[in-house]
Image (cartoon, rainbow, N blue to C red):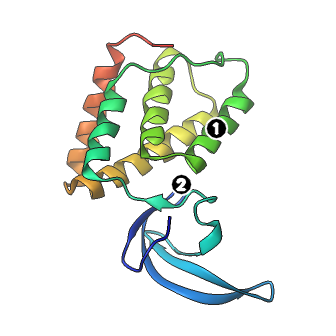
């Protein structure tokens, strides 16, 4: 997917950003076209041909945002790993899903990790992933729905509470 100046995008680590410029720059002596993306905390320069591989994608539409909330409200998926086994593999799988996935994947990760946190204590990596992914989801929903962040947080928390009452699915 190609982006234009002014497009809102999501980076899997840095969150919501805006394409401020598309320009040529020198990287290791080679001339490369890059997106200049301004996020809340920094300015990123991402080569055009590597943007998708690095997880940069268009921000969710309002319809996708509503789907994200439905996913968070839906029953969590059964965790293929146990609390004590496979923690490294689970962390790697989650990071891959965040990097390669779409908005709906982020909603699933928040839903499933939140549910797991009520069953057993998440390891440090899982806690970090839950906090980071939840913030990404909140940022994206805030923009996509055009409502204040406080209202989005309320919607997400209500959806997670509704999820707690549902059985885990396979």
Q: Residue furthest front?
A: 1
Q: Residue furthest right?
A: 29
- Where does label 2 land, which residue? 12
C-alpha span from label 2 to label 1: 16 Å
- The structure residue drawn at horizontal position 28% and vertical position 55%, both measured from the top left corner, is 144
Instruction: Evaluate whether residue 15 shows in this view.
Output: no
160 left or right of 114 in image: left
- The structure residue drawn at horizontal position 65% and vertical position 67%, both measured from the top left corner, is 50
- Tell me the crowding category of disc 1: few under 14, some 14 to 19, or many 20 or more residues within 10 angstroms, Cα based: some
Q: Position of residue 126 (x, y in %)?
A: 59, 34
- The structure residue drawn at horizontal position 74% and vertical position 32%, both measured from the top left corner, is 88
Q: Position of residue 132 (x, y in %)?
A: 50, 47
Name the mark on residue 112. none
The answer to whether 22 is drawn above or below residue 52 in the figure is below
- Where does label 1 land, which residue? 125
Q: Nearer the N terminus, badge 2 or badge 1?
A: 2
Q: Secondary structure at mark 2?
A: loop
Task: Determine the image quadrant of residue 74.
Answer: top left
- Tell me the crowding category of disc 2: few under 14, some 14 to 19, or many 20 or more residues within 10 angstroms, Cα based: many
Who is closer to the viewer here, 16 or 63?
Answer: 63
Q: Position of residue 170 (x, y in %)?
A: 51, 13
Q: Position of residue 129 (x, y in %)?
A: 56, 41
128 left or right of 3 in image: right
Task: Determine the image quadrant of residue 54.
Answer: bottom right
Who is closer to the viewer here, 116 or 28?
Answer: 28
Task: Determine the image quadrant of residue 128.
Answer: top right
The answer to whether 127 is drawn above or below residue 145 in the figure is above
């Amino acid at each position: 997917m190609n982006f234009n100046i002014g497009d809102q995008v999501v980076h899997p680590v840095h969150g919501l950003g805006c394409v401020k410029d598309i320009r040529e720059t020198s990287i290791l002596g080679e001339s490369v076209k890059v997106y200049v993306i301004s996020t809340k905390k920094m300015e990123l320069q991402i080569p055009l041909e590597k943007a998708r591989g690095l997880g940069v994608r268009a921000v969710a539409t309002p319809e996708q945002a509503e789907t994200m909330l439905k996913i968070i409200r839906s029953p969590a998926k059964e965790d293929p790993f146990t609390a004590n086994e496979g923690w490294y593999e689970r962390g790697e799988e989650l990071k891959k899903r965040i990097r390669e996935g779409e908005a709906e994947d982020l909603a699933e990760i928040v839903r499933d990790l939140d549910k797991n946190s009520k069953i057993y204590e998440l390891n440090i990596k899982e806690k970090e992933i839950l906090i980071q992914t939840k913030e990404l989801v909140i940022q994206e929903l805030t923009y996509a729905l055009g409502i204040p962040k406080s209202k989005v947080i309320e919607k997400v928390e209500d959806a997670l509470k509704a999820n707690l009452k549902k059985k885990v699915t396979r």
